[in-house]
Image (spheres, grey):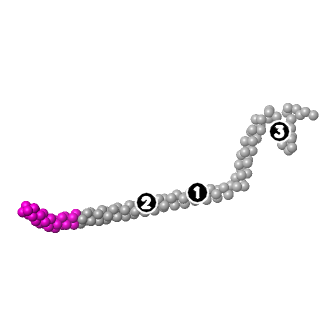
Amino acid sequence: MIPSKDEQLTVVGETIRQPDDAAQALKSDVTGGANLDKVRDILFGSQLREVERRFARLEERLVKDTNSLKDDVKKRLDALELYVRNETESLTGQIKSEHEDRVDSVFRASTSSCPRTSASFDSRCSISISA
């Protein structure tokens, strides 16, 4: 027996509608979707709201911890910058002091050896002139 165009076919527990019923099927799917959302809300609504609250608390905690870490890193970098600046100034002072000491040492050594060199030169010149 061949079913008519207006009849529904049943195949293994499922109803297959003819193309004329497509608009009605679409309409029932939309209202069925709304009913499905209501069922989901009834079954899982409290769990979903709890998960959303937990995510909100987690996000707040992450923002708070991130801000705290940012402040801590800024303080540490400022302290490091101050330490490096002080060490640089200290080393610069030491280098200048050592440079001045070496310049004075070289100047004193050259001025103290100058009269001896001059006397030695004079004596050699007088020997060569008299010879």
Q: Is residue 130 magenta?
A: yes
Q: Please state which amino acid type lies under the numbered disc 1.
A: Ala
Seen from the viewer's position, the closer of residues 23 and 3 is: 3
Segment colored magenta: 103-131
Residue beneath disc 1: 56
The local secondary structure at tag 1 comes to helix
What residue is at 23 percent from the left and 66 percent from the top? 101
Mark 2 vs mark 1: give the one in front: 2
**Going by the picture, which residue comes out furthest to the right?**
1
Q: Please state which amino acid type lies under the numbered disc 2.
A: Lys
Q: Is residue 116 magenta?
A: yes
Residue beneath disc 2: 74
- The location of residue 23, given as percent across then percent down, is 76, 35
Residue beneath disc 3: 16
Q: Tag 1 or tag 3, which sits nearer the N-term?
A: 3
Compute the Cα span from label 2 to label 1. Answer: 27 Å
Q: Looking at the rendering, which quadrant does residue 89 occupy?
A: bottom left
- The location of residue 109, given as percent across then percent down, is 19, 66
Is residue 89 left or right of 27 when viewed as pictured? left
Q: Residues within 10 Å of mark 1 (few under 14, many from 20)?
A: few
Is residue 115 left or right of 9 when viewed as pictured? left
Quadrant in the picture for the C terminus: bottom left
Compute the Cα span from label 2 to label 3. Answer: 68 Å
Q: Please state which amino acid type lies under the numbered disc 3.
A: Ile
